[in-house]
Image: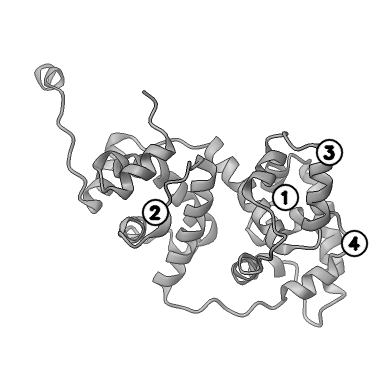
Amino acid sequence: MIYTCYDMVRDCRAGRAEGRSYFVSQYVPVIQKLVARYFPECAADGTLIGRLLVALDRPESSLFQSLDPAPERWFVAELRQRVLAAVEDFQGQPVPQPEIDLETLGSALEPLTMVEKQAAWLETMRYTAEEAGVLLRMDPRTVEKIRDKARERIRSCLNAWRRTLLADNGRPLGRAAALAHTEPCLADKAFLDVLDGRATWRGRDEMERHVSTCWHCIDHFCRLAEVVELLRRLTPLSEAGARPFYDVLGIPRRSEPAWKRWLR
């Protein structure tokens, strides 16, 4: 019997050890990668991942409240948002005001295509041209050319500019984009259809007309592309690697099979 993400959500909601231990072994590596990318200054904090797990494991956490069929990519996209928000809460510092707002960014990059805007936006997510090329299935040299064009357009709209402006303002811009949802914004399935190569020509055309002027959906698309790549490279924790986190959450130790004890 295959144990699925849906099974995990159901069991975690019920407080069962099976779901909670599966969450630790499968998704702590995702949490670790997210923290390393977005909060590298926290790399030396050996207690951070444990504190994040405790915060996510609370009954009031909405991460495990939905019993809708939960595709793994949807779940990890939700996990991403909660991890970033929780680390910001732990830091106890307000998210700084961005040096460039979405309106100014949108005006500067208005002539760019949807894909070009995604290439530029991934810079706010701290992705190099090489890494963004993997997510967008694009030559890194093309990504860098797009970013150079975007930088020139942004520079022409601001009095103060530097090459790292988008990367330096990624967190406040990402938060602003996440809050900029409107009624026409698209559901996860539309973006995942594009990423999976299932989108029809008409569906993709309709999506591009909306997304090209919506930074919420550009951010959403980039986040889902990030999730797809995270899961593609996912290596679950070994039992030894997961054990300290089981202990943090109070997950009972599994009984070792008798044959293993006998061999030992």
Instruction: Look at the numbered disc 3 and give the secondary structure of its residue.
Output: helix
What's the residue type where badge 1 is placed?
A: Ala
Could you tell me how far apart the alpha carbons at marks 1 and 4 are, in whole angstroms? 21 Å
Residue 56 percent across, percent down from the top left:
36, 57
What's the residue type where badge 4 is placed?
A: Pro
Q: Please identify, in this view, whether the residue under mark 1 or under mark 3 is nearer the observer.
A: 3
Could you classify mark 4 by the number of other residues whose Cα lies within 10 Å: few (under 14), some (14-19), or many (20 or more)? few
Marks 3 and 4 close (CB-CB < 8 Å): no
Could you tell me how far apart the alpha carbons at marks 3 and 2 are, in whole angstroms? 36 Å
Q: Please identify, in this view, whether the residue under mark 2 or under mark 1 is nearer the observer.
A: 2
Q: Which mark is residue 201?
A: 3
Earlier residue among tags 1 and 4: 4
Q: Quadrant of the N terminus?
A: top left
Residue 216 percent across, percent down from the top left:
68, 62
Q: Which quadrant of the view contains residue 184?
A: bottom right
Q: Which mark is residue 65?
A: 2
Could you tell me how far apart the alpha carbons at marks 2 and 4 are, in whole angstroms? 41 Å
What's the residue type where badge 2 is placed?
A: Gln
Residue 254 percent across, percent down from the top left:
18, 35
Name the residue that disc number 1 marks.
129
Instruction: Look at the numbered disc 1 and give the secondary structure of its residue.
Output: helix
Could you tell me how far apart the alpha carbons at marks 3 and 4 are, in whole angstroms? 22 Å
Residue closer to the observer: 174 or 238: 174
Earlier residue among tags 3 and 4: 4
Question: Which residue is located at x 32 percent, y 41 percent?
Answer: 19
